[in-house]
Image (tube, grey):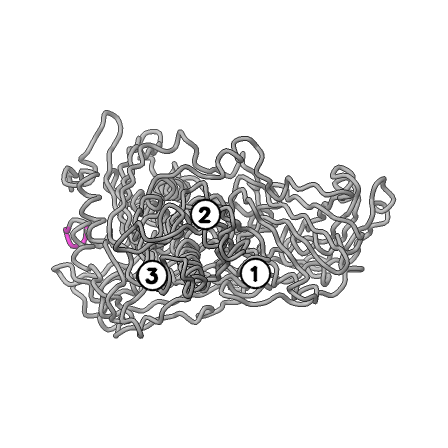
Amino acid sequence: MTLTRPVVVGAGVDRVDGPLKVAGAAPYSSDIALPGMVHVALVRSTIAAGRITRLDTGAAEQLPGVLAVLSHHNAPRLAAGPTNNLGPTPPPPLQDDRIRHHGQYLAAVVAEKPYQAAAAARAVTVEYERAEPVLRIEDPGGELRNDPFGMDATRGDAAGALAAAEVVHEATYVTAENTNNPLGLFATVAQWSGGRLTVHDATQWTSNTCQTLAQMFEVPESAVRVYAKYVGGAFGSGLRVWPHVVLAVLAARTVGRPVKLVLSRPEMFTGIGHRPNTVQQLRIGAARDGGFVAIEHEALQTVAMDDENLEPVAASSASAYACPNVTTRDRQRRLNIPCPGSMRAPGEAQANFALESAIDELSYLLDMDPLDLRLRNYAQVQPQFGLPWSSKALRECYQVGAERFGWSRRDRRIGAMRDGRWRVGYGMAGVSYLWWQVHCEARATIGSDGTGYVRSAATDIGTGTYTVMRQLSAELLGLELDQVRFDLGDSNLPWSPQAGGSGLTGALGNAVHAACRELVRTFLRTVVNDSASPLRGCTIDDVAVSGGRIHHRADGKLGESFVAILARHGLDELTADGVSDPPDPQEVGMAPAGAFAAKFVEVHVDPDLGLLRVPRIVSVVDGGRILNEKLARSQIIGATVSGVGQALLEETVTDPRTGRIANANLGDYLVAVNADIGEVDVTFVGEPDQLTPLGTKGVGEVGLPGTAAAVANAVYHATGKRIRSLPITIDELLD
């Protein structure tokens, strides 16, 4: 099957859900209102470690409107959730009297009105037996876990090569804890009816939420249905089934009515994960000509006492550059903190800052241009597997980025570039954001009126999945955009992976491609022996689709419409399913590439006031085949803004004595706003990827890594101050 008018995909189509959103008509989980619905408020721990010695709910239970108060005293024992590619499910809440972190849920109050639930939650009395919390990443009192992901890598003899290297750079880099802070507060609405559970949630993965709740509450998956039609952002925090979701379901079962639980902003800081802080040691050895001879990268990150967070940091350095001797090592320290979780570009956001800063430092030791040093060590093949990349245009990213930015105008002398009182610096970084394709399913249908319906359990977290998949479906079925409906965000639909890890567009797009092709085959099978059809006896390779018709490739007049085929055969619709699965790299002889990018940044620093401005950022991205350039560009811009936040503003501050987060609000936790962001120039380069029928690669996260390193490298170029910890603060810039 060929496409005669491939004009829908690739076009900068506006979001199809845009009108609903600007009109306030898109129903987020917090908007759901069901008849008889009641509300849940949470009681949280005010200490970070210890046990509950007394929890008195008597006063709360006597308040108006209160229906139930759940705690470890009366909550049922729940089964553990499943383990998947994100690791184990967070432990179920209210199962014992142990305190593991400040802000832990100790009780859930169910009441008729939200204000009644909140008042009753304040009336619950809790007394503790306190223990000394372990709160610092360097605290030896916290259990140290070596190689927690099984991904530590050794290639060659890094230690020996470093000992013999002509030039060696060694340094420690620190990244702060960050909190995801999506705009929409997470909310869960749960309802039990006749042993069946319906949940509306801000999840990024309906299929997993369905499986997890079924396992925890010991009911069949077929009895659970999870909706996430619209999600107000998540940035990774909606990937796991967090305790508040379980509490909403438990509360609904307890009172026999639908319940709603909406997290407050402070509860968002302690209840849905965060980017863990890291301490990373980098050693890079090189020959005088700049060729890398060895890289050692060791990363220590934080994790909760009784939970897991699958977030390798150092591991990515094994494949970023051509280097014969590499050792990577990841470790975790258990602390009395809320469990970390995925935050846009998990692991790579921290690792890239360390590696790309270290390479910049090495360039000065070698007296080489930082861009030339990266090109000198370009990985033409995948270093770990020795296989060619399925696609890679990082060299083109460097070249186009340097030209668009004006890198050749950079004065290599430290502090030599000025703009009045401002010291000007140029910095850059490379980005290799590897991703792995995953299993996905989709279903395509054409009805008797010629409308196409394509469905999957996938979630659109604001990235544009509704739009891109509708574009793709329209092209594959030869329909106009307004003739196609794309349905998602429902666990009853065909299984989908998470909307995260930059993998959904590729996996879902491939499944949609398979479903649409199979649907065309189904139509052809319907007319294979139909003497009235000009398509009689045709195979999928003989035909093309356009204008709502299937026709011969050689002669567009020989064909007929989907509507005509259905009508002649007395059918209301035809449906087909499609599946995508990742290929084995060894079988296809290629390594999955992921996306690549180059970041170029200009900074202005006022050394008298410690002010730092970022007036200009150039991002050049190899994202494979771009399905919607407008939306892809928005993804890169948004990720770049997040990268500026990581570099200059964002830090979740935990009191080292109490474990309380001191800035759990948007007044004190700083995120980048319009005034912080200058010009962001985004360009896409490269060719379609060879491992997928669509040639796509995910671009949701590749725009974030590289930003912080490029900013820090530019600061050094402007001031001579090498900043190795994030965020960069005023005191570090003052003369």
The label nearer to you, 1 versus 3, is 3
Disc nearer the start of the sequence (1/2): 1
Residue 72 magenta: no
The label nearer to you, 1 versus 2, is 2
Give the image location of residue 57, x and y in percent: 82, 50
Label 1, label 2: how far apart the Cα atoms are = 18 Å
User: Which residue is label 2 attached to?
Assistant: 465
- Residue 673 can be seen in this image: yes
Please give the label number shown on residue 692: 3
**Residue type of the residue flagged with mark 3:** Thr
Query: Does residue 247 lie above or below 262 as drawn?
Result: below
Over which residues does the magenta segment extend? 364-368
Secondary element at image label 2:
helix
Task: Classify the position of the N terminus by image quarter.
Answer: bottom left
Instruction: Please identify the dominant SS of the magenta region.
Output: helix
| Nearer-the-camera pick, 664 or 394 | 394
Q: From the viewer's perspective, is 693 left or right of 374?
A: right
Label 1, label 3: how far apart the Cα atoms are = 24 Å
Quarter residue 338 falls in: bottom right
User: Which residue is label 1 attached to?
Assistant: 208
**Residue type of the residue flagged with mark 1:** Asn
Residue at 17 percent across and 39 percent down: it is 410
Query: Does residue 489 lie above or below 423 as drawn?
Result: below
Give the image location of residue 726, x and y in percent: 40, 46
Disc nearer the start of the sequence (3/2): 2
Task: Classify the position of the C terminus by image quarter.
Answer: top left
**Farthest left residue in view:** 289
| Nearer-the-camera pick, 410 or 542 | 542
**Residue type of the residue flagged with mark 2:** Thr
